[in-house]
């Protein structure tokens, strides 16, 4: 039976649907780039869409003891929108600062730099609040493990959290204290959902474009003389262009991912409402 065909029973691990799931999961786990992880997560959630179409999946998740887990999963999918908003807000500030740098007006540059740093602070606050809210939703709950497809969904929950954690960490981490804090959240979620945690490999660089920009601009505004600031304009412009390019790639990855996430979110909410 093909992957898109509905079934009245849960297929075994040898079934094409389960085999596709395992292949997508394997590729995602082997990805070292956040961009490839987003693509892998899109493929995985496309497969989840088919899992959620199975009548017995819907019946199992509609059971009262499973609804708490379904609510938690829906909240996790909402993290995609939070990431998209954070990227958009940062990109708008990047473009405003690039425009000011091209005009090379000292006072305007300083104002835009401060605006950028204030926006970054607000973005970090929003993301941290979202993680705290997710923590509240991640209380221990039972899930029916007798059906393999339900177990598969539990694995998707784990890997989805891991990818969003990696993405949001990329956006907000700018020092060891922040890294330690986020790792603490990750550890707590790991204990609460009791997953087979996905081994995330190191990003291609220990210092990402967001962090380099935060550090560079913080240093930029400490220069006392306008001449000193203008000497650094070309360097800052190059950093901003690299950051803008990175944001564009991440936005495209999230846009592709959002389609299956929206479908799965709707499916899960329909299950909760029946």
Image (cartoon, rainbow, N blue to C red):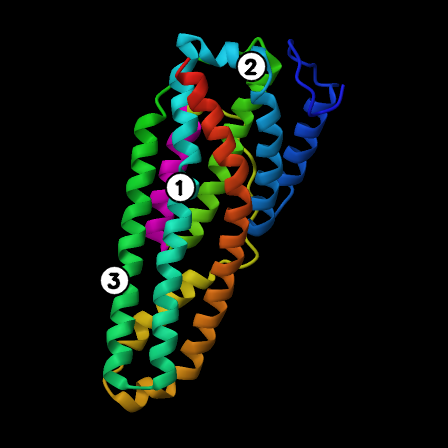
Q: Any magenta on residue 188?
A: yes
Q: Which mark is residue 18?
A: none
Label 1 SS:
helix
Along the horizontal axis of the image, is 156 left or right of 98?
Answer: right
Residue 79 in the figure: left or right of residue 226:
right
Q: Residue at x 70, y 33 (%)?
A: 23
Residue mark closest to the camera, 2 vs 1: 2
| Residue 57 tag number | 2
Q: Return the x and y of residue 64 as percentages of the image width and height.
A: 40, 8
Q: Quadrant of the C terminus?
A: top left
Q: Are marks 3 and 1 in contact (CB under 8 Å)?
A: no
Say which residue label 1 marks: 183
Q: Label 2's element?
A: helix
- For disc 3, the marked residue is 118
In the image, residue 257 lies at what x, y percent? 54, 42
- Sequence-wise, the earlier of marks 2 and 3 is 2
Q: Quadrant of residue 91?
A: bottom left
């Amino acid at each position: 039976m093909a992957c898109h065909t509905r079934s009245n029973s849960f297929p075994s691990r040898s079934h094409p649907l389960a085999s596709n799931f395992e292949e997508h999961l394997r590729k995602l786990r082997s990805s070292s780039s956040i961009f490839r992880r987003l693509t892998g997560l899109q493929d995985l959630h496309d497969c989840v869409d088919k899992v959620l179409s199975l009548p017995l999946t819907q019946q199992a998740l509609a059971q009262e003891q499973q609804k708490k887990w379904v609510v938690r999963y829906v909240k996790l999918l909402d993290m995609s929108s939070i990431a998209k908003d954070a990227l958009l807000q940062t990109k708008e500030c990047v473009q405003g600062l690039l425009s000011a740098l091209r005009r090379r007006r000292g006072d305007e540059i300083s104002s835009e730099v401060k605006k950028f740093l204030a926006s970054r602070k607000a973005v970090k606050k929003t993301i941290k609040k979202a993680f705290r809210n997710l923590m509240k939703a991640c209380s221990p709950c039972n899930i029916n493990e007798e059906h393999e497809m339900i177990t598969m969904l539990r694995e998707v929950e784990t890997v989805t959290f891991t990818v969003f954690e990696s993405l949001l960490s990329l956006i907000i981490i700018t020092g060891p204290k922040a890294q330690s804090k986020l790792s603490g959240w990750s550890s707590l979620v790991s204990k609460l959902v009791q997953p087979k945690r996905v081994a995330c490999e190191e990003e291609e660089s220990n210092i990402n474009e967001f962090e380099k920009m935060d550090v560079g601009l913080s240093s930029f505004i400490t220069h006392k003389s306008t001449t000193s600031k203008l000497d650094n304009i070309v360097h800052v412009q190059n950093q901003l262009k690299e950051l803008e390019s990175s944001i564009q790639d991440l936005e495209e990855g999230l846009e592709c991912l959002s389609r299956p996430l929206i479908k799965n979110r709707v499916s899960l909410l329909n299950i909760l409402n029946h």
